[in-house]
Amino acid sequence: MNKIKYPQDIDVALKTWVKLARSFSTIYRKASENIKSFGLTLPQFAVIEALGHLGPLKVGDICHKMLATGGNMTLIIDNLEKLQLVRRVPSKKDRRVILIELTDKGQKLFDEYFIEHAKFIRDLFSVLSLPEQKQLNSLLGKLGLGIVELEKSK
């Protein structure tokens, strides 16, 4: 088998991408398993988390926070409504706007499970020291914002 030799900049970028993708996949799987133990899917929990931290939001704002499409979000919210965790309420400021808010049951779920999940995430990341986590956080932010800027300049 012939191993292809790439220039160092390409080789490092490819290896970094593969490690980032594998790490994300592992973290996503573990986080999904943890959230499933609460009786929710990861997207459902993300909606509960956003509403728990930010209060009532428009569907579009939830989509933006979660990087999700409107059609998919409607289904997620419909299912959360069936579970009596969220409700749709008309905005008092603009009659055209419908807000999504936590019900008492949804707020209780957020209050009980979010800190438990946050501790679970902390434990996953504990393989890195706190300074390493801060460095990774900074580097990932720089990467994401830098790619956005590259896109804008094209």
Image: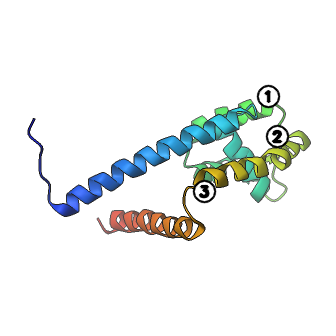
When the figure is inspected, residue 10 is found, relative to residue 134, above or below; the finding is above
Residue 104 horizontal/vertical position (percent)? 91, 43
Residue 114 vertical placement versus 8 (above, below)? above
Sequence-earlier tag: 1 or 2: 1
Which residue is the site of mark 3?
126
Residue type beneath disc 3: Ser
Question: What residue sits right under mark 1 in the picture?
Answer: 82
> What residue is pinned by disc 2?
87
Q: In the image, is 69 to the left or to the right of 144?
A: right
Which quadrant of the view contains residue 44?
top right
Q: Amino acid at mark 1?
A: Lys
- Residue 145 on image: x %, y %: 44, 67
The residue under the point 59% across, 39% down is 30
Mark 1 and mark 3 lie on one chain; the one further toward the N terminus is: 1
Q: Quadrant of residue 34?
A: top right
Residue 66 at x, y percent in the picture = 60, 49
Query: At 60% across and 56% down in the image, what residue appears?
Result: 126
Residue 63 versus residue 144: which sits nearer the camera?
144
Farthest right residue?
A: 104
- Give above or below for 2 relative to 125: above
State the CA–CA distance, disc 1 to disc 2. 9 Å
Q: Nearer the viewer, residue 35 or 125?
A: 125
Circle 2: residue type: Arg
